Image: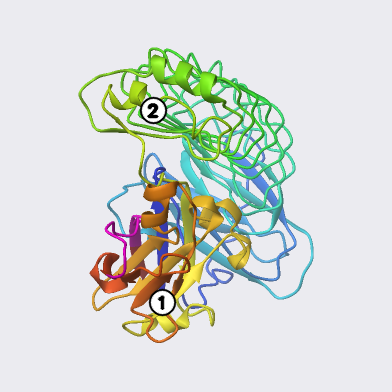
Amino acid sequence: MKRFLTFNILMAIMMFAITGCNGDNDENGNGNEGGKGVGTMTMATSKSGEVEIFIAGSRSGTFTIDWGDGSAILTLPLLEYDDGDWLSKYVFRHNYSIESTRLITIAGENITHLDCQKNQLTTLDVSKNSALIYLQCWGNQLTSLNVSGCTALTYLGCSGGNKLTTLDVSKNSALTWLICHENQLTTLDVSKNTKLESLGCVGNPLITLNVSNTALTELDCNGIGLTNLYISNNVALTSLHSYNNKLTTLDVSGCSALRELDCGKNQLDATALNALFETLHSNPIEKYIYIYNNPGTSSCNRSIATNKGWNTNEIPNVYVDFTIDLADPEFISLTSVGESVVVNKFTNNWGYRAAGFAENGIIIHSGIDEFFAYDCTCPHDYVLNEETIKIEIDKSSSIFAVCTKCRTKYGLPANGTPVEGAGRYPLKTTRQVMMEYVF
């Protein structure tokens, strides 16, 4: 058995972090030949070791896999996808003994779900699978991706590790989720994706982004160099994260459902911030705006926002989505109660997915029956002076964390509550899910 922890906030990214005992299927096939027509998908990898692919369908049947190494072509059961099921039954594995480029071919007209993440794929062709509704291919080495034939696609995840320079989703009118963090996209056109509800494009060198004609509820476009963001009249939008860009103006007129707006670390002067405050709605819901590290942060008129019911003094939410293996030497201490580790953007090359607010990182603490995850930014210094001071695990006891400036001590098993010092606010938490599979 292996245990994995997946941490996420803001974006409910569906991740299948899967491992287990050696599950080679090499000897189970009946030699069926894989087709090359409708429903055929191919992917190239030079990986040595185990490859894992998650495959499910719209109804029960069969499909074939040719692993591309001369082993028997397998005919396997295609199971109808049910998100309440034990996920391991949809996973198919194969071991390659040496590094060598191989073309994996999967054929089945009713395949609707494909997760081929972290398989060192250099190419992926799903253009002939019009039935596909879910595609997750993050953590590979893709430089191009053609989904034009996937007209039923509703979820596309192609983040982290890939190096896509273009992404055409104009034919995917059913798309509701698009997560393309940390690629090399210079343009992104979602004008035809009028059903799009969640868009994440962190870490791409985009200059302009227009999402005014979508059904967006969540937009995460942090750290991409944006100078223009067209977001007005997105009446369903509840969460906008656009920090660490180059925005000089921002207009959220018509965004009447907005609850959280993070535009910190841009180039908004006092006049621009005051103009932004004027476009904020005044609907009676709990709502937050974050304006830290802008030229006008200290001189703007915050009362324009606060008079409309907006809170301006809380550590912002940030995109966090990573998986840790408790068998990894870096994290094995978490199998013992009372231990803590810090995860940051350098850990296992997770980048933005584990950076936390102001790239201070995330503290993971193992409790008696659960794990806790906290942002490493001291809430006391942030609320007082909008300083992004990093906290550290207490050297004398790993059940505490201490701010390096105000010296507030926080109890990690006690939901990050201050137990000593000037601080009055608890540490900011991230949502976490522990997934435990036995194969």
The magenta stretch spans which residues?
420-433
* Mark 1 closeness class: few <14, some 14–19, many ≥20 residues within 10 Å: many
Instruction: Point out residue 314 in the picture as x, y percentages from the top left corner.
Output: 35, 44
Quadrant of the snapshot with the N terminus = bottom left
Instruction: Point out residue 59 in the picture as x, y percentages from the top left corner.
Output: 37, 41
- Asked whether 307 or 426 is in front, the reply is 307
- Residue located 36% across and 46% down the image: 81
In the shown orientation, is residue 278 left or right of residue 286? right
Question: CA separation, marks 1 and 2?
Answer: 38 Å
Q: Is mark 2 on a helix, strand or loop?
A: loop
In the shown orientation, is residue 114 left or right of residue 165? left
> Is residue 227 placed above or below 429 in the rendered structure?
above
Q: Residue furthest right?
A: 100
- Asked whether 292 or 133 is in front, the reply is 292
Q: Which residue lies furthest to the front in this view?
A: 299
> Is residue 53 placed above or below 178 in the rendered structure?
below
Quadrant of the snapshot with the C terminus = bottom left
Check disc 2 and give the amino acid type.
Arg
* Mark 2 closeness class: few <14, some 14–19, many ≥20 residues within 10 Å: some
Which residue is disc 2 drawn over? Answer: 302
Residue 340's disc number: 1
> Is residue 98 placed above or below 260 in the rendered structure?
below
> Is residue 308 placed above or below 205 in the rendered structure?
above
Label pair 1/2, CB-CB below 8 angstroms = no
